[in-house]
Image (cartoon, helix red, strand yellow):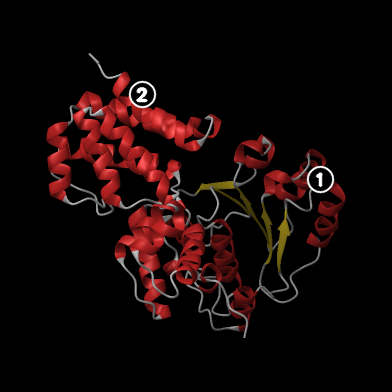
């Protein structure tokens, strides 16, 4: 039997399974319960945050045999068909591959016909910003005054490219990037469901790399399971992602606080033996500066902080607030400029030297 990747096998099928996006879930749940769902919904956000998943959940809510509900049963024929991608009245259109006006007119002509299998006919247009200007013009009138029992669900990663006339005809929901803690909780549930042992630090490394995208996190988790021969450990995660051990990041921060240029350069160059991802190193270093700065002003520490409190307490005594803010700024600018450097290692080393060279009084 073919393997189903984790991102598909564990895709949320009800609002209760959805990770994060509480503001969207609350608004849609209330609208469905009150019978006041708008006929055109626009979901925006970066990749993998749940745009098309929410759209499919809305389709189930509208066509479930129980009736229009915010909690579809997932057992009736319409629910199972939508989950399987075989529901005739859920028309999914890929805006990236069907950009021309002729393609839009084909399914706009079909809008006039009532649903054949369910209660509502739903058009899910993914990456809608890729449609041409003529295609948008052909869509406008239908989007504003659709026939009864027709719902439009639009999804895009780039809402700035949508015409204002389209946005004004939709109810817009901006999905946010997921916090690390919620992605880790979800991956933990997935691995427990799959019966795979894991180390929490390995999941946190994956979550930080996924950068707010749950789909990216599950795809990386799939890769990590294969890479580690079924072992989800921090060591395997760091090796796969090109991340150096966390204690090396802390050591770099210690050398920076001591302003020891020869030792700092020597340690930075020794990292080359690990074939690291220098962008990841600067990302983790910047994150460590943030944790130290927060520790200097408060005793509260977020759940996704990976460093022991004694490490943060020790480093917070060796840094001034000014240095932390300066180093953080240089680290994130160094990440941006890394692709322009002669090579990644040289760009990384110069970023470290820049932190010390531009210190006040240096």
User: In which quadrant will I find the C terminus?
Assistant: top left
Report the disc number at residue 92: none
Dot 2 surroundings within 10 Å: few (below 14), some, or many (20 or more)?
some
Q: Nearer the viewer, residue 191 or 120?
A: 191
Reading the image, the residue beneath label 2 is: 354
Q: Position of residue 360 (x, y in %)?
A: 25, 16
For mark 1, give the secondary structure: helix
State the residue at coordinates (48%, 54%): 213
Reply above or below: 303 against 297.
Answer: below
Identify the mark nearer the N-term, 2 or 1: 1
Residue 307 shown left or right of residue 82 in the figure: left
Specify few, some or many for label 1: CA neighbours under 10 Å numbering under 14, 14-19, or 20 or more: some
Picture quadrant of residue 126: bottom right
Q: Relative to 257, does residue 147 appear above or below in the rendering?
A: below
Q: Nearer the viewer, residue 24 or 320?
A: 320
Work out whether 78 lies above or below 245: below
One can see residue 131 in this view: yes
Task: Give the residue at the far bottom of this rendering.
Answer: 1
Residue 138 badge: 1
The answer for how far apart the CA atoms under marks 2 and 1 are is 54 Å
Number of marks in the image?
2
Q: Circle 2 — which element?
A: helix
Give the image location of residue 334, x and y in percent: 43, 31
Q: For residue 284, what is the image quadrant?
A: top left
| Residue at figure coordinates x 43%, y 29% from the top left | 333
């Amino acid at each position: 039997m073919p393997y189903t990747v984790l991102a598909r096998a564990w895709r949320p099928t009800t609002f209760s399974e959805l990770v994060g996006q509480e503001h969207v879930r609350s608004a849609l749940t209330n609208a469905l319960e009150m019978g006041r769902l708008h006929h055109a919904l626009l979901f925006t956000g970066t990749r993998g945050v749940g745009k098309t998943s929410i759209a499919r959940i809305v389709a189930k809510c509208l066509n479930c045999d129980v009736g229009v509900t915010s909690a579809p049963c997932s057992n009736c024929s319409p629910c199972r068909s939508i989950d399987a991608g075989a529901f005739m009245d859920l028309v999914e259109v890929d805006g990236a591959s069907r950009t021309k006006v002729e393609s839009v007119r084909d399914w706009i002509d079909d809008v006039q016909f009532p649903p054949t299998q369910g209660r509502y006919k739903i058009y899910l247009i993914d990456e809608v910003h890729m449609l041409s200007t003529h295609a948008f013009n052909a869509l406008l009138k239908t989007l504003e005054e659709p026939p009864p029992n027709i719902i439009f669900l639009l999804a895009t990663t780039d809402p700035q490219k949508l015409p204002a006339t389209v946005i004004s005809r939709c109810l817009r929901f901006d999905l946010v990037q997921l916090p690390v803690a919620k992605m880790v909780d979800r991956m933990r549930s997935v691995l427990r469901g799959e019966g795979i042992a894991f180390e929490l630090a390995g999941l946190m490394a994956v979550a930080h790399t996924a950068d707010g995208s749950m789909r990216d996190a599950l795809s990386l988790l799939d890769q990590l399971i294969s890479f580690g021969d079924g072992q989800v450990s921090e060591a395997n995660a760091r090796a796969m992602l090109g991340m150096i051990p966390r204690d090396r990041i802390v050591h770099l921060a210690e050398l920076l606080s001591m302003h020891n240029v020869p030792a700092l350069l020597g340690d930075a160059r020794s990292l080359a033996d690990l074939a690291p991802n220098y962008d990841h190193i600067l990302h983790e270093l910047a994150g460590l500066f943030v944790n130290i700065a927060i520790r200097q002003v408060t005793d509260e520490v977020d759940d996704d902080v990976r460093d022991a409190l004694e490490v943060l307490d020790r480093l917070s005594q060796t840094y001034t607030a000014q240095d932390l803010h300066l180093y953080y700024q240089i680290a994130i600018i160094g990440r941006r400029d890394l692709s322009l450097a002669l090579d990644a290692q040289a760009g990384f080393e110069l970023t470290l030297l820049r932190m010390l060279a531009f210190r006040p009084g240096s």
